[in-house]
Amino acid sequence: MTDDLAIISAITLYKIVCLVVGSLFCWLGYRLFTLGVWGHAGDFDAKFKSTKLVLKSAAPGTFFAILGAAIVIVTLWQGLRFDLRLRDPNTTLAGTSPPPLPDAHGAPK
């Protein structure tokens, strides 16, 4: 049971860290805007299926905010999934033991 708790704790901590890092990136982007950093940072092109996002001569805060928002969205979209059945190598997804392997002469054990 402690192994299960360790797995659940690790996954939960990973998700919390992802949310904190994404939020930090968004906050840093916001701070760049409020401090008046408007220098030319470059161009950004992204395409997903039939949708295209183009940023020309964007401020540096834009890139921080977009990256932070993407991290938060992906983290929340994936959610928390705990599949503890896969820990035991002798158990298949159906919860039964795999068939016995044949010995050196080809006969099942």
Image (cartoon, rainbow, N blue to C red):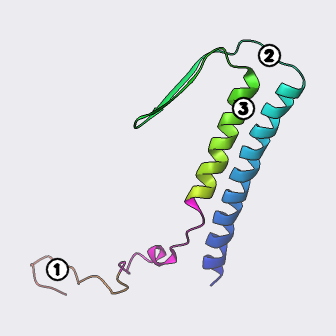
Inspect the image, locate mark 2, and give the three-letter code of the amino acid beneath it: Trp
User: Where residue 37 appears, x then y in whole percent?
Assistant: 83, 18
Report the span colored magenta: 78-93
**Residue named by callout 2:** 38
Label 1 Cα neighbours within 10 Å, binned few <14 / some 14-19 / many ≥20: few
Q: Is residue 73 left or right of residue 86?
A: right
Determine which of the numbered discs, if any, sits on residue 64 in the image: 3
User: Where residue 70 appears, x then y in whole percent?
Assistant: 62, 42
Q: Residue at x 76, y 39 (%)?
A: 26
Q: Is residue 7 left or right of residue 37?
A: left
In the rendered structure, which disc, 2 or 3, sits on the residue that comes first in sequence?
2
Q: Residue at x 61, y 16 (%)?
A: 56
- The residues bearing labels 2 and 3 have C-alpha atoms spaced at a distance of 13 Å
Q: Is residue 81 shown in magenta?
A: yes
Quadrant of res 22: top right
Q: Secondary structure at mark 2?
A: loop
